Image (spheres, rainbow, N blue to C red):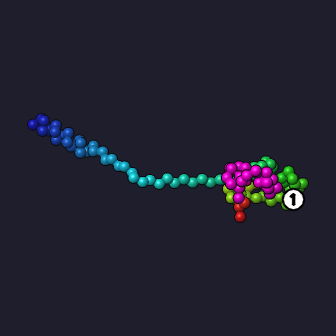
Amino acid sequence: MESTKLWWLENLLKSILVCHEYTSSRWHAVASWTWDAQDETCGICRMAFDGCCPDCKLPGDVCPLIWGACNHAFHLHCILKWVNSQTSQAHCPMCRREWQFKG
């Protein structure tokens, strides 16, 4: 009688504590990356955007801000010098992505 109770209790515990295995055959990873272009200075000359680049004499002298496809901004003269100085494909001086003018 005692062994029957133990057998019954053992089977009850096994049925309660059964672990189910799960193997995933497929999964999908999702990631997102954004570039923050909230700087107030040019990443090349380090001069403030509301001022002028080293090539300009006065603030506002035909030196607009230029954005790249990566959302980094530079003075027009600064990025043109940078792009022209690159020996191969031009890259953004901040993130090193291939440089493309945003447009």
Q: Is residue 68 visible?
A: yes
Residue 16: give x, y in percent of width and height.
Answer: 25, 45
> What residue is drawn where x is 42% and y is 54%?
26
In the rendered structure, does residue 97 fall within the stretch colored magenta? yes
Instruction: Return the residue at label 1.
Output: 61
Work out whether 13 lies above or below 73: above
Residue 102 horizontal side relative to residue 5, left or right: right
Residue 19: give x, y in percent of width and height.
Answer: 30, 45
Residue reaching furthest front?
88
Q: Amino acid at mark 1?
A: Asp
In the rendered structure, does residue 5 fall within the stretch colored magenta? no
Quarter location, residue 8: top left
Which quadrant of the rendered structure holds the N terminus?
top left
> What residue is drawn where x is 87% and y is 59%?
61
> What residue is drawn where x is 79% and y is 54%?
84
Work out whether 17 lies above or below 99: above
Q: Residues within 10 Å of mark 1 (few under 14, many from 20)?
A: few
Given residues 58 and 29, the one toward you in this image is 29
Residue reaching furthest top?
2
Q: Is residue 41 visible?
A: no
Residue 46 horizontal side relative to residue 9, left or right: right
Q: Secondary structure at mark 1?
A: loop
Residue reaching furthest bottom?
103
Given residues 95 and 37, the one toward you in this image is 95
Residue 10 horizontal side relative to residue 75, left or right: left
Which quadrant of the rendered structure holds the C terminus?
bottom right
> What residue is drawn where x is 23% and y is 45%?
15
Given residues 16 and 62, the one toward you in this image is 62
- Give the extent of the magenta segment: 75-100
